Amino acid sequence: MHNIKKYLLLFVPFFFFSTKPMDNPVSRLSTFATNFWDVCDKDKLEVTGGLLIGAGAVAYGTHLWNQKYRSNLYWNWKTINTNNLAFPHNFLWGAGTSAHQIEEDCDNNSWSSNSPWASQLQNKKDFVFPGKACEGYSCCFDDIQLLKDIGCNAYRFSVEWSKIEPQLSKFDNKVLQHYADFCDALIKNNIKPVITIHHYTDPIWFLEKGGFEKEENIGYFVEFCEKLSEALAGKVHMYLTFNSPSGYAMPSYLLGDKPPFKKDMHLAATVLKNMLETHVQVYKEIKKQDSKVQVGILKNIYQLDPWRIWHPVDRLFCYMGKKLVDDCFFDFFNKGTFNVSIPFKVSINHENKNAPKSLDFIGLNYYGHTYFKSTQRFHPKWEEKTANENYYVYPEGLYRAINELNNKIALPLQIPIYVTENGIGTDDNAQRERHMKRYLYAISKAIQDGANVKGYFYWSLMDNYEWGNYNAHFGLYHVDFETQKRTLKEGAQYYPQVTQSYNEACRLQTSSLVYFNPIKDFQLDENDYGLVTF
């Protein structure tokens, strides 16, 4: 034992002084082992001691490997000026909402108090129904001024299917006319209407028929979209068919957390497949009504990262999640194939060769990532918390998500990306501003590195109903739900600075990318950008 202790004491300093700080820890360990053996008294080196040293070397090597892996996932924000931005001309600056979250009288859908699943919803902690919400249906024309005040040239909002078609094949033309009039009002104010057709809610009658569980129900949604696009023909800049199909299918059919509260991996994958198939058919129908309108779908990316890059269980859980949620989506729109195969859980193979031709753009929703350590999800202490326990501040992840979507969808299909949803739930104004600066910087960096991003929609325009309560405040505007008064938050004032600075820079610059600094109030400096001073 005396010899073992002696050689173990030699281990740490010898490791550092006998090797070079190479990037590859395996090479470093190999050099260490060779040099260490040369200086050891081989006659006295006991086998047990050698094994212990070897085990220690491997453990330290994997530690270095993990540190190297994790350090690549983060940026040093102390060295970054987040105010130095670059965006292309004709960029869409917008904000987003959804009907159920802001409109009053949403009492005929799967999330309403009249829903067959109302009692299960009420079993959720702190759950309340939306009630009047922001009275966004009756106040929508007044809310246009909110968009103008912060410099938005686009507004992403959703239509409520259960209001337009309260019963199967019975359409309310007054509601359709309301949405048509609202689009006209936006256009009159130089704001492009960007419509999400399906944002997590279904008419009660549709879900009672099995919803997207059954392929034969696809026709009901296609009929609704045909009627909608006919009423709004020539008034819509972009249609988003679904707000994150995986964000609907997985919580509702795998986790059993949302209506209709089912827990079946095969069923969840089936719903996802049917929603993607529905998109292809809806794309065709909308184009019949309006060949010029742009039609796309939204992809939510929530990275699953292994906490220990070398650990097979950590990596397996991340692999399975990505396979179920991401890879099948990418393959469907690239190759026209939907394949999900997880042993003993799910096996689905579907083909539609028209799928790669059914996207004019791809939308990206991004809020964060998580680590897997064995079977547990967690976030490290250095990531900032938000009002949503699943979302921690991680702007580097938006950069990663844009590049992934660019490589997997945008480049192969030659279509642009729009960041259709990104924001933070917080009451801390400093955190909101810091979040906005860093995430916009991440988008700017991705653009400068070659990603074809054409627009950004902050979530959300105003504080609203967040799927069970009003506790998480994502809005640029604070809402007093008693008086319905909207007030721009102090932490949101950076956004109009960005849009105003961008517009001014566009008038001065003709290059493909527009460089500007919102804080400098248009005083561009050639040392910052390598450009002439204006």
Image (spheres, grey):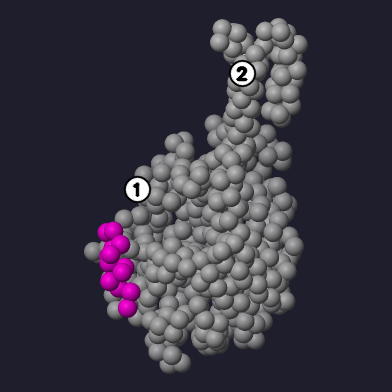
Across and down, in percent, residue 171 comes to 44, 90
How far apart marks 1 and 2 lie (CA) works out to 58 Å
Q: Are marks 1 and 2 in contact (CB under 8 Å)?
A: no
Q: Nearer the viewer, residue 7 or 492?
A: 7
Across and down, in percent, residue 423 comes to 47, 53
**Residue highlighted by disc 1:** 427
Q: Circle 1 — which element?
A: loop
| Most common secondary structure along the magenta stretch | loop
Q: Is residue 385 magenta?
A: no
Across and down, in percent, residue 81 comes to 57, 36
**Picture disc at residue 48:** 2
Name the mark nearer the viewer: 1 or 2.
2
Mark positioned earlier in the residue sequence (1 or 2): 2
Q: Is residue 384 visible?
A: yes
Residue at 46%, 46% (x, y): give it: 376
Query: Which segment is the magenta one?
Result: 116-129
Residue at 31%, 59% (x, y): give it: 470
Q: Nearer the viewer, residue 89 or 417?
A: 417
Lateral position of residue 201 relative to residue 39, left or right: left
Q: Is residue 398 visible?
A: no
Residue found farthest to the left: 482
Q: Is residue 117 magenta?
A: yes
